[in-house]
Amino acid sequence: MRNHFTFAQFQFELETVEPLQLPAYKGSTLRGAFGHAFKKVVCALRTKTCGDCLLNERCVYSYIFIGN
């Protein structure tokens, strides 16, 4: 099904409205925040968990964050 993988590299800058303190390992926090926002944008069945979703084999969120 998914035999073609395209890779893109993005660079972005974030600016906080209020002071922000991040943990020592920031990658996990940023990945979680991006994943949450990304799922809100691409999820077709918002009431389902990924494991129970009928679309999870074709879902870009599931492919990137769950590994299906």
Image: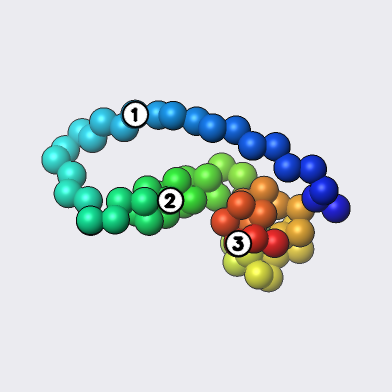
Three-letter amino acid code at the position of disc 3 = Ile
Q: Counting residues from the N terminus, which is met first, the one under dot 3 or under dot 2?
A: 2
State the mark number for residue 24.
none
Residue located beneath label 1 in the image: 13
Tell me if 62 is positioned left or right of 33 in this view: right
**CA neighbours of label 3 inside 10 A, class few (<14), some (14 to 19), many (20+):** few
Tell me if 15 is positioned left or right of 33 in this view: left
**Residue 47 visible in the picture:** yes
Q: Which quadrant of the figure has residue 66?
A: bottom right
Residues 11 and 34: in front is: 11
Q: Do the residues labelled 3 and 2 touch (CB within 8 Å)?
A: no
Residue located beneath label 2 in the image: 31
Vertical comparison of 13 with 65: above or below: above
Residue 11: x %, y % from top left: 44, 29
Q: Are marks 1 and 3 in contact (CB under 8 Å)?
A: no
Instruction: Give the residue at x 23% y 56%.
Output: 23
Q: How many labels does the image show?
A: 3
The residue most toward the left is 19
Residue located beneath label 3 in the image: 66
Instruction: Give the residue at x 34% y 29%.
Output: 13
Q: How far apart are labels 1 and 2 at the CA level?
A: 14 Å
